[in-house]
């Protein structure tokens, strides 16, 4: 739950605002972002990694206001598309603190990065080097500096997370394989390009990871690559970016590692390996997204329909025979993570206290799909009724940013709360916004919902 969450007279308050008031003023579903929590977590990473660069992985959640907070708080920003880059630049984010990722950056995206003078491009393929070289040459020709580049290495770590969000095993699309020698070949190639400047290496092993052993093993291997590179070329690299992926608590039993502990462990591995190889210790960088954006946001929904569904009689002894399907006014269009990754969320009755006995519930959305589940199984007070508000915890990362218009539901707004004030930092999408894209309907006024 966000750091500012508290119950007053049974009602959940966020950033000093009662949820019923937020729901009345902004409607539901509603993302409520606790600004102090978001910026506090960014600051915790910045403090723990004060001798390193902390890049906020903006894919977790990005809008103009977030870009400004991250800029003002001195962090860097990791963009993984030209449009994330454009958004950050449009919000005034300093280009030199932006890195561009992506396994298939287009010519237009690369040109935007080169023209804006971003901090570095994280190169992900030989094709990308071929695309970048002429652009870098043109920039240098015009009196500009060589383009700073990191090489993304695939270190062959099996991170213990969902298959779709693990990224450093061999059989997937990101990076240059360390095992096949591609990473070394790519690094040597970039070093030989006069208009590219290889400043360091990058590794990212996956997302929602609790066990730091994976990061430590990755750090060990990628420093090893630095050693090989020096042996092959004499070149010593100054930067080592170990990516993001630090897990957060979605449920109370989840036990995330603190930024300070992550920093201590990564520093220790890198220092030991550098000592072993007689390399200078590079400047570290990390890219937390979820660990900054995730915990401080909740989604507020209004309950519509409640349907008790009888479970098969074959359940284990003690299994309740009824599960209440509690339907809310959003669903997989504002949080696809349960359906897509089998993610676990929890929620509470937010607008009031209840001492009714608990009933087994499943919180579902309103989409035309039975997999449209938000919280698979939980106990809610048996007296929840239509009109009550539910607050789902830890929805700040990869929910709004992965929202869709499935079934033509509209993307919810994001309201930042702090010290009793609520500011809509992203407004609710309207049907007119959506009709505007439609060749037949663009000229028609949208009916009011
Ligand atoms: N750096 C790189 C290169 C990445 O690919 C990612 C995430 C991050 C940093 C940030 O990871 P984080 O600290 O947020 O875990 N949609 C999925 C997560 C996809 C993550 C993709 N890359 C989800 O909802 O779990």
Image (cartoon, grey):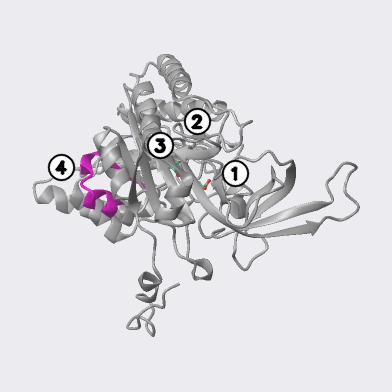
Circle 2 Cα neighbour tier, 10 Å, few/some/many (<14 / 14–19 / ≥20): many
Residue 101 in the image: above or below residue 203 = below
**Residue under the image location 25 percent in, 51 percent down:** 113
> Is 176 left, or right, of 146 in this rendering?
right
Q: Which residues fall within the magenta stretch?
A: 85-101
Is-magenta flag for residue 91? yes
> Is 393 left, or right, of 142 in this rendering?
right
Q: Position of residue 433 (x, y in %)?
A: 36, 70
Residue farthest front in this picture: 9
Q: Are marks 3 and 1 in contact (CB under 8 Å)?
A: no
Residue 16's disc number: 3
Q: Position of residue 11 (x, y in %)?
A: 53, 40
Query: In the rendered image, which residue does mark 1 sit on?
Result: 347
How many discs mark residues in the rendered view?
4
Query: In the rendered image, which residue does mark 2 sit on?
Result: 218
Nearest-to-viewer mark from 4 and 1: 1
Nearest-to-viewer mark from 3 and 1: 3
Q: Where the C terminus falls, by quadrant?
A: bottom left
Q: Separation of disc 2 and disc 4 at Cα? A: 31 Å
Label 1 residue SS: strand
**Residue under the image location 34 percent in, 75 percent down:** 436
Is-magenta flag for residue 97? yes
**Residue under the image location 55 percent in, 55 percent down:** 302
Nearest-to-viewer mark from 4 and 3: 3
Nearest-to-viewer mark from 3 and 2: 3
Mark 3 C-beta closer than 8 Å to ligand 1: no
Query: In the rendered image, which residue does mark 4 sit on?
Result: 145
């Amino acid at each position: 739950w966000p750091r500012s969450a508290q119950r007053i007279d049974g009602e959940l308050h966020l950033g000093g605002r009662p949820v019923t008031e937020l729901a009345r003023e902004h409607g539901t579903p509603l993302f409520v972002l606790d600004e102090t929590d978001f910026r506090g977590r960014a600051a915790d990473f910045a403090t723990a990694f004060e001798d390193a660069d902390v890049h906020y992985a903006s894919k977790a959640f990005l809008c103009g206001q977030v870009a400004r907070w991250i800029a003002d708080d001195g962090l860097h920003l990791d963009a993984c598309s030209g449009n994330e880059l454009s958004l950050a630049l449009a919000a005034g984010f300093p280009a030199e603190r932006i890195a561009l990722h992506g396994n298939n950056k287009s010519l237009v995206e690369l040109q935007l990065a080169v023209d804006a003078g971003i901090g570095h491009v994280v190169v992900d393929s030989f094709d990308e080097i071929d695309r970048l070289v002429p652009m870098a040459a043109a920039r240098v020709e015009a009196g500009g500096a060589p383009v700073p580049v990191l090489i993304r290495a695939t270190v062959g770590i099996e991170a213990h997370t969902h298959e779709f969000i693990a990224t450093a095993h061999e059989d997937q699309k990101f990076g240059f394989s360390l095992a096949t020698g591609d990473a070394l070949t790519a690094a040597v190639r970039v070093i030989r390009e006069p208009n590219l400047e290889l400043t360091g290496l990058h590794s990212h092993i996956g997302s929602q990871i609790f066990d730091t052993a994976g990061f430590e093993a990755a750090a060990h291997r990628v420093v090893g690559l630095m050693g090989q590179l020096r042996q092959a070329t004499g070149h010593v690299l100054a930067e080592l970016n170990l990516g993001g992926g630090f897990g957060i608590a979605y449920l109370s039993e989840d036990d995330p590692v603190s930024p300070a502990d992550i920093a201590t462990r990564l520093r220790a591995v890198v220092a030991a390996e550098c000592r072993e190889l007689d390399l200078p210790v590079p400047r570290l960088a990390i890219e937390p997204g979820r660990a900054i954006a995730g915990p401080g946001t909740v989604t507020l929904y209004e309950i519509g329909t409640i349907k008790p569904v009888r479970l098969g009689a074959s359940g284990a002894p003690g299994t309740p025979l009824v599960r209440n399907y509690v339907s809310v006014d959003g669903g997989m269009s504002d949080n696809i993570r349960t359906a897509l990754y089998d993610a676990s969320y929890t929620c509470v009755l937010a607008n009031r206290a209840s001492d009714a006995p608990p009933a087994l519930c499943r919180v579902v959305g309103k989409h035309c799909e039975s997999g449209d589940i938000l919280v698979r199984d939980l106990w809610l007070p048996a007296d929840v009724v239509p009109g009550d508000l539910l607050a789902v915890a830890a929805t700040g990362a990869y929910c709004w940013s992965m929202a869709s218009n499935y079934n033509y539901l509209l993307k919810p707004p994001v309201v930042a709360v702090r010290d009793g004030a609520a500011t809509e930092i992203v407004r609710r999408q309207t049907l007119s916004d959506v009709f505007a894209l439609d060749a037949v309907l663009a000229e028609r006024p949208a009916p009011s919902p």
